Amino acid sequence: MSETTEAPCNKRITVVRTLLILGVVLAVVVSSCGFILSETEKAIVVRFGKPVRTLTESGFYPRFPAPIERVIRIDRRLQHAEIRLSETLTKDQRNVIIPLFYTWRVEEPLTFHNSVGSVERAEEKLNALITSARNSVIGRHPFAELIAPVGSPTNLPTIEKDILALAAPDALVQLGVNLLSTGITRIQLPEANTESVFRRMRAERKREATKFRAEGNAQSATMKAETDREATRLLADAKRQAEEIRGNAEAEAAALYAAAHGSDPEFYRFLRELQSLRTIVDKNTTLVLDTSIAPLHWLKNSENPNAKPTPILPTPKATPGNLTQNPLLNDTPSE
């Protein structure tokens, strides 16, 4: 019984081992005679060192086992890189440093393999192509087009498109690379030129300030001249009106004096003498004069109210403009 049971077990073990060996052999044959291409790859099948097929779609592909055929896999994903920092000249001969970023992917696997063969070598070649295109495009634009105040449009998008349009055809033909985009990351000035740029900016601002100040001074002078002219005109009109008013008042005063003199000459002479006395004498006045002389004879009468007035010497008859020969009794109105 033991011998009969051991024989089937040995047979089953032998079958399992055979199947495992066949599976391993089949896997080895399949792996050596075929391969799987993923979605992120492109491939070149090389037979005895010579490319025979270019594969761009994912899936399973047969091949002859090595060393007859060999598969070169190439990454088809989007790549991103930046060019090295270097100076370039603008149209107005200004040194600037304009680093760029760019994105690319392999478009022609065979051309890519024959020209560069790796991502690192491809980026070295792309750096040279894009740097040359950047220098050519920047050389056609002045420095003022590269900068603009905040919120103002600039020419940077146009410059980026021009660089891409200039470098993309060469990248595709020479490297088998599809250059998808380029962009300017920043604009820098060499350290040696920074101070000169600041001096130029200060000079420009100073020139603008001088211009605005001169325009302001001119407007101020014009306004002052107009104001002075208007003030002179107003003063002249005021003086003229004042002279007219003064002349009319003097004429009315003269008419009043003449009317008063004509109505009662003696009373008018009496008032004039009192006015002269008020003008000459005040509380601190000391006079040593003959009180018989007009108008001082009124002082004499005021000291002795009961005294009779001193006779007044006859005076010539009053004539227009001269009521008496005494200058104090001159009835010409004083201003």
Image: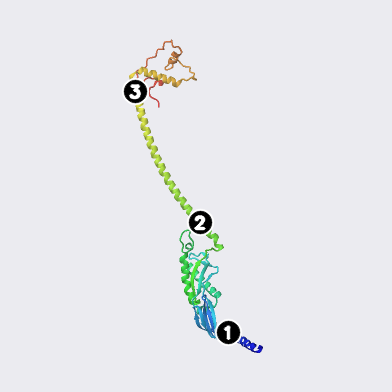
Quadrant of the rendering where the N terminus is positioned: bottom right
Quadrant of the rendering where the C terminus is positioned: top left
**Local SS, label 1:** helix
Image disc number at residue 55: none
Disc 2, disc 3: CB below 8 Å? no
- Given residues 191 and 200, the one toward you in this image is 191
- Residue type at mark 3 is Ala
Left-right relation of 181 to 257: right
Left-right relation of 179 to 10: left
Residue 297 placement (x, y as % from top left): 43, 15
Can residue 320 be seen in the rendering of this structure? no
The residue positioned 38% from the left and 35% from the top of the image is 239
User: Foreground mark, 1 or 2?
Assistant: 1
User: Foreground mark, 2 or 3?
Assistant: 2
- Residue type at mark 2 is Ala
- Given residues 169 and 237, the one toward you in this image is 169
Residue that lies at the very extreme toward the right in this rendered image: 2
The residue positioned 42% from the left and 44% from the top of the image is 225
Residue behind mark 3: 258
Residue behind mark 2: 203
Measured in 3D between alpha carbons, the distance from the residue under mark 2 to the one under mark 3, in whole angstroms, is 80 Å
User: Foreground mark, 1 or 3?
Assistant: 1
Left-right relation of 205 to 327: right
Can residue 216 be seen in the rendering of this structure? yes
Up-down: is 119 above or below 311? below
Residue 137 placement (x, y as % from top left): 47, 68
Q: Are there few (<14), some (14-19), or many (20+) residues within 10 Å of tag 2?
A: few
Up-down: is 245 above or below 89? above
